[in-house]
Image (cartoon, grey):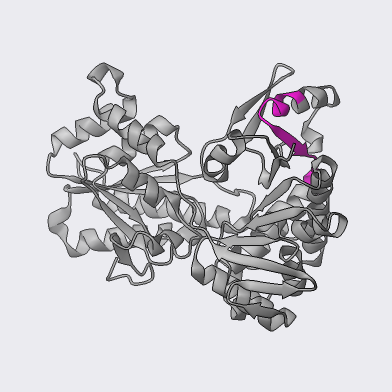
Amino acid sequence: MAKTIIISNRLPVQLQISNGDITAVPSVGGLATGMKSVHSGGDSLWIGWSGLTDEEIPEELVPKIDSALAEHGSSKVNLTEKEVDGFYYGFSNRTIWPLFHYFLEYSEFELDSWETYKAVNQKFADAILEKANNEDTIWIHDYQLMLVPQMVRAERPDISIGFFLHIPFPSYEIFRTLPWRREVLQGLLGSDLIGFHTYDYERHFLSSVRRLLGLEVSFNDIYLDDRVIKVDSFPMGIDYKKFSDAAKEHSQRTEDQKSELQKRLDTHKKSAPDAKFFLSIDRLDYTKGIAKRLNAFEYFLKKYPQYKEKVRLIILAVPSRSNVPQYQLLKREVDELVGRINGELSTVSWTPIWYFYRSMPFENLIDLYTSSDIAWLTPIRDGMNLVAKEYIATRTDKTGVLILSEMAGSANEMNESLLINPNNFEQI
């Protein structure tokens, strides 16, 4: 029977080793949540890295890991510490991520990292070939695996392959600075269908294909040898019902049923009924514009002092890629900014910024979404930004304001929000 094989860098489950035993816990957020309905809705297999390197896994636990993953319809690709360092922290996140988000000054072009990226992509391709039949559908995800489609195509010319890029695809002028630009395009063109979040990303990709490979492009079709490759935009959505239902259930809770966070939020609301909560939720990433947002908030409070004690900014910064130097510098910058602003502007009864550096369980996210009057999401560049959609889904009482960067992919769909240029300080 034909099955769908989903491939991504990480599996939709997290492995936890304790007392010589393994448990697999479903991941929350991002790709895992977005693909959940596809993965659970039929004969499907998900292939990816488990999150544990070969060095971290005791040999006697390998069979237990395989069976724990199999219960979640998953199969792992084994990676060493060195491979993770070169492939994930190296080429994926020090070359492709900054380049595709227009942060050229952060992009590193190291041959060793590229060689590791190629070798690991081959590992993923081999894992697919081992599990796939010709009638299966292969669905490959994101910038870590851009060479995999062609590697699979070379061995299985007739198999159906789709690829989806979850980050922006940059303009030709940016993309052509990559030394291995042709190889990346050729890798992607192993697919039958290539998807992007927005028409702009799709257009940039087609332009690069035409100008770098000289292939015939007609509308959104690419002609290569005896194949036609379709390119299109498919904006990623959220499980709207899940968020909407959670918000409705949340509004009916008694005092005893509320979380500690919600009780604290309620206490602050009661102490200043006219005060407004701003909410900012992002991964701690330089593409998200968190430092610019903090500087703008400080500027706002100094320019309009009448709003002191009447607004509070709640920042949830989810830890991310803490091994990469730029992320370590960003964390220090954000920590110092929050400390300085709170130190300068706080009063006895009011702290302007509440700063959380951690991920939060789903229940607490709903607390924040439903309690905040304004969601303030101003990334400098973002593939989509699903937080904007989640916030709107939880506003079941039809209140709330969404301030959204026009550089986020979701701005193309959510044009009734307050759209701003994140680089325009006065506008913010």
Q: Is residue 102 visible?
A: no
Q: Position of residue 194 (x, y in %)?
A: 64, 62
Please identify the quarter of the rendering in which residue 181 is found: bottom right
Residue in front for this viewpoint, 383 or 37:
37
Q: Is residue 71 magenta?
A: yes
- Describe residue 322's horizontal placement relative to residue 92 as left or right: left
Would you say residue 208 is visible in this rendering? yes
Q: Which residue is painted at 27% across and 71% down in the image?
A: 426
Vertical position of residue 157 compared to residue 172: above or below: above
The quarter of the displayed image where residue 46 is located:
top right
Between 241 and 425, the residue placed more toward the observer is 241
Q: Is residue 168 magenta?
A: no
Instruction: Determine whether, in the image, residue 20 is placed left or right of residue 400.
Output: right
User: Where does the magenta region start and end?
Assistant: 67-82
Q: Quadrant of residue 424?
A: bottom left
Which residue is depicted at the point 38% across and 71% down? 423
Vertical placement of residue 356 versus 191, above or below: above
Decide if residue 321 is on the left or right side of residue 52. left
Q: Is residue 104 above or below residue 248?
A: below
- Percent across and percent down for residue 89 are 69, 53
For the N terminus, the quadrant is top right
Q: Quadrant of the C terminus?
A: bottom left
User: Residue 38, position in %: x, y?
Assistant: 58, 40
Q: Is residue 13 above or below residue 281?
A: above
Tell me residue 227's x, y (percent): 75, 68
Q: Residue at x 78, y 48 (%)?
A: 124
Question: Is 5 on the left-hand or right-hand side of 416?
Answer: right
| Count of all numbered marks drawn on residues in the image | 0
